[in-house]
Image (cartoon, helix red, strand yellow):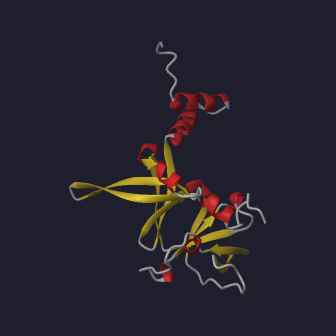
Amino acid sequence: MNRYEDVTPMTTAVSAAQQAGASPSQAANAAKRQDTIQVVEFLLGMEHFAIDLFDVKEVMEYTRIPELPNAPANIKGIIDLRGEITTIFDIKQTMNMKQTSSHAETSSRIIVIDNTITKSKIGIIVDAVLSVSTFPRSDLDESASSTVDNQLINGIIRKKTKIKDSLSTDLVIWINIRSILEESGLGIGAVT
């Protein structure tokens, strides 16, 4: 193979983006995004989770959530978000996690999900939002998703953090919010 035949995923992505009319810098950025994942990191109890950044519309502070009578257990209630009724989804309930938390409910956050993947306005309540992060795909272990019966987990992200002079690795569970919402009947592809 000569040097002109060496096709990597990066050069393939750049070529595809350029053929679609993107400038060389836009094409390079598109290729870099393929080699990275961008997520919103959050806590549920003491566990560290993440969802795809592009599935998130916004993060908002906790507000009182009126409960709905006879609603499924995974529906926490509803809120008025700038004039639109938004259903608040209890992701802990759906993932069979203990409801206990060291965080006061009033310090919780609501992650509003992008409406292109839901049937209606949906928010998920989490104990804390930590950050928006970009990780190289090499930090992702997708084999963990095969140990679960369904496709609720995209993989485990190995997050490297430096504490004083030593390097530590935290494990972040990257969940597939689209699949979780579909299984709960709230996603676009859900059967009702």
Q: Position of residue 43 (x, y in %)?
A: 46, 69
Depth check, front residue: 175 or 128: 175
Depth check, front residue: 13 or 44: 44
Horizontal relation, residue 11 to residue 182: left or right: left
**Does the rendering let one see residue 177?**
yes
Say which quadrant the C terminus sits in: bottom right
Q: Position of residue 59 (x, y in %)?
A: 56, 67
**Does the rendering let one see residue 82?**
no
Q: Residue furthest left?
A: 165
Depth check, front residue: 99 or 76: 99
Q: Residue at x 50, y 39 (%)?
A: 32
Q: Residue at x 43, y 68 (%)?
A: 47
Depth check, front residue: 95 or 164: 95
Q: Residue at x 62, y 33 (%)?
A: 17
Q: Position of residue 168 (x, y in %)?
A: 29, 56
Q: Residue furthest top?
A: 2
Q: Quadrant of residue 177?
A: bottom right
Q: Position of residue 117 (x, y in %)?
A: 69, 58
Residue 134 vertical placement versus 186 (above, below): above
Numbered circles on residues, count? 0
